[in-house]
Image (tube, rainbow, N blue to C red):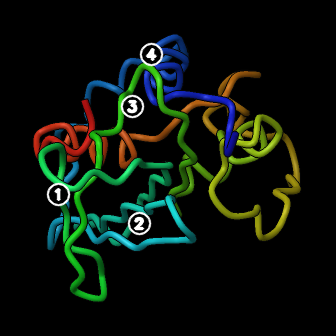
Amino acid sequence: MLVEMTMQELIRNTEQIPTEKRHHIADQVQIVGGYHVQRIGESDLVFQAKTSTGHTAKIRAVVSETPSGGASVELSDGTPMQFAPIATRADDVQISCNCEDFYYRFAAVNSRYRVLFGEITKPYIPKGPRMSDREPASDQPAICKHVIKLTHLLQSQGIMR
């Protein structure tokens, strides 16, 4: 198994964080240029989208190729691919974003649960008392509004259900 969390579990954990903004303002995030898909290994796909504020959200999922039907995408190299849609309730994913909210509040916890796609490049070491919005959000993996927006985009395209 690649990871240990489904997208539904990540979204549920995010909704339980004591702030209304993250989940509710995800629809205000603007993705520019759609999403790009890269294949890693035999069955891993990475969906990546850039936002109008310069942040990059990524979702990595294991997919099962299918000869016809299902979801279809064009990979970064131009190759078409068809696969069974990613099930938010069943398929495990890994996620990342380069925004400060994700880095300071979620990356370390997501890494411990093997949900972080990539590595934490440098640990956050506070120079003084931390601001409350920089405290880790919870002891459970969660996601930022940019990853939520990418999830919504993939669902609207039939890539994720």
Alpha carbon distance from label 1 to label 3:
30 Å
Amino acid type for the residue under numbered disc 3:
Arg
Tell whether label 4 touches label 2 (CB within 8 Å).
Answer: no
In the picture of the structure, the residue carrying the numbered disc 4 is 15
Location of residue 34 with respect to 141 vertically, above or below: below
Alpha carbon distance from label 4 to label 1:
30 Å
Amino acid type for the residue under numbered disc 4:
Glu
Amino acid type for the residue under numbered disc 2:
Thr
Question: x%, y% of residue 93?
Answer: 53, 41
The mark nearer the N terminus, 2 or 4, is 4
Alpha carbon distance from label 3 to label 4:
8 Å
Alpha carbon distance from label 1 to label 2:
22 Å
The mark nearer the N terminus, 4 or 1, is 4
Question: x%, y% of residue 99?
Answer: 50, 58
Alpha carbon distance from label 2 to label 4:
21 Å
- Label 4, residues with CA under 10 Å away: few <14, some 14-19, many ≥20: some
Question: x%, y% of residue 37?
Answer: 33, 69
Question: x%, y% of residue 104?
Answer: 68, 48
Kindly state the secondary structure of the residue where label 3 is placed. helix
Kindly state the secondary structure of the residue where label 4 is placed. helix
The mark nearer the N terminus, 1 or 3, is 3
In the picture of the structure, the residue carrying the numbered disc 1 is 72
Kindly state the secondary structure of the residue where label 2 is placed. strand
In the picture of the structure, the residue carrying the numbered disc 2 is 56
Q: Which mark is residue 22?
A: 3
Between 158 and 52, which is closer to the camera in this rendering?
A: 158
| Position of residue 132 in the picture relative to residue 84 (left or right) | right
- Label 1, residues with CA under 10 Å away: few <14, some 14-19, many ≥20: some
Q: Residue at x 19, y 37 (%)?
A: 155
How many marks can you see? 4
Between 93 and 119, which is closer to the camera in this rendering?
A: 93
| Position of residue 12 in the picture relative to residue 158 (left or right) | right
